[in-house]
Image: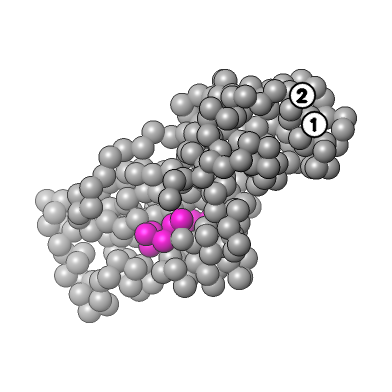
Amino acid sequence: MAQSITREAALRVALAARELGSLSARELVSALVERLDLPLTEAKLSTVTVADLQVLLQGDDVVEPDVPKEQLKQAVRLLWGEGITNSELPAVASYSEGEMPESIRVACASNREQLLDGHYGSCERFLIYQVSPSEVRLIGVRPTLEADHADDRNVARAALIGDCQIVYVQSIGGPATAKVVRAGVHPVKVSSRDNPAATAAATLAQLQQALRHPPPWLARIMGVEAGSLTRFAAHLASSDA
């Protein structure tokens, strides 16, 4: 089945929603889909005008009628793709299965650049990393907009990261946690109180250290039996020699 929202379109909608303030990306994409139909592509977004956006949003009572016109103009520019820098959507490196021995796959809930600043149920994207004791590689950026239009958003988001072993989030609720765990993914909270602008790189650097001498929970994720942890650590040490 064809993707209903392209990666670039998802970025444009998320940035436009942020420009509009209290409007969520999910609300904006719902309004746009009602007018433009699926799939939601860059070409379709490029046809939206300020008048279209004003009528579309006010007609559904999504935003207040007195939203400044300049704010609407900037939102439209973002829907068109204007002014979006490469830093808004991180560059992805190529990766082939088995290319990074002793590695695991990790998702990071994110809204901006490569910050780990997202809540599981509302983040704009998941950054997907392959992490080994010696390397961290960004191998995917997965927008969540399409998942948010599923009957069960939490299940759809869990499926989006179902090939990962760990997901880092700022927060996650109980029901969502159960569905993530059921999908075989281990959720880890990174407190915004301790680090409100945590970067994925800093968090994954700590994970790299843990991979060298994994605690029991991480050993299970890695598929390393407790009795073989000593041999595993010795193997890593000899690899560094």
For this view, does 154 lie left or right of residue 128? Answer: right
Helix or strand or loop: what does disc 1 sit on?
helix
Mark 1 — residue? 55
Q: Residue at x 53, y 41 (%)?
A: 39
Which residues make up the magenta segment? Answer: 160-169
Gap between marks 1 and 2, in whole Å?
6 Å
Quadrant of the rendered image containing residue 124:
top right
Task: Please say if 54 is above or below 141.
Answer: above
Q: Residues within 10 Å of mark 1 (few under 14, many from 20)?
A: few
The colour scheme is: one colour
Q: Which residue is drawn at 48% across and 48% down?
A: 126
Mark 2 — residue? 51
Residue 121, horizontal then vertical, whole percent = 60, 56
Q: Residues within 10 Å of mark 2 (few under 14, many from 20)?
A: few
In magenta segment, residue 77:
no
Quadrant of the rendered image containing residue 57:
top right
Amino acid beneath label 1: Val
Residue 137, horizontal then vertical, whole percent = 32, 43
Q: Which residue is drawn at 38% across and 59% down?
A: 164
From this viewpoint, is residue 119 visible?
Answer: no
Task: Work out whether residue 200 or residue 97 is closer to the camera in this orientation and state it.
Answer: 97
Amino acid beneath label 2: Ala
Q: Which residue is the extreme one toward the right?
A: 66
For this view, does 235 lie left or right of residue 65? Answer: left
Helix or strand or loop: what does disc 2 sit on?
helix
For this view, does 14 lie left or right of residue 231? Answer: right
